[in-house]
Image: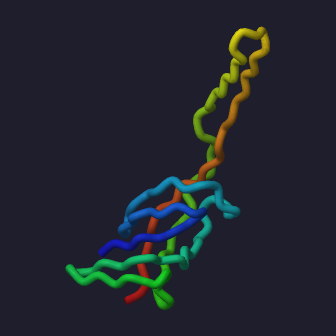
Amino acid sequence: MYAIVETSGKQYRVSVGDKIVVDKLNAQPESEIVLEKVLMLSSEGKNIFGSPYIAEASVKAKVVDSFKGDKILVFKPRPKKTHRRLTGHRSRFTKLAVTEIIGG
């Protein structure tokens, strides 16, 4: 059984026991969260599609960790001039462990 869920505007395919990395969520480590935006459920060859979401379905997950990603450097030179700019960026992520898929 697997489900396709949406969080932070992105879609993820999850099964029970999967660990996924999503954009930062406001949740403490070791806490339980419920993802209610389920787009599709698949079980034993039977697929259920939402329009856009399935009302009775949800996915329970446990927050494993919150962390920062790798630094991304952005270099903006100006041609034929001595002007240039170097900036950096580190995104924040949350790691989730899927514990249960509810619905159908």
Residue at 67% over, 23% down = 75
**Residue 52 versus residue 18: which sits nearer the camera?**
52
Say how the picture is coloured: rainbow
Quadrant location of residue 39? bottom left
**Residue 11 versus residue 76: which sits nearer the camera?**
76
Residue at 63% over, 31% down = 71
**Residue 99 versus residue 91: which sits nearer the camera?**
91
Quadrant location of residue 84? top right
Residue at 65% over, 61% down = 25
Look at the picture and state if 59 lies above or below 27.
below
Q: Quadrant of the N terminus?
A: bottom left
Picture coordinates of residue 8, whole percent (x, y)? 60, 62
Residue at 47% over, 77% down = 38
Picture coordinates of residue 83, whole percent (x, y)? 79, 14
Q: Quadrant of the C terminus?
A: bottom left
Picture coordinates of residue 41, whole percent (x, y)? 36, 79
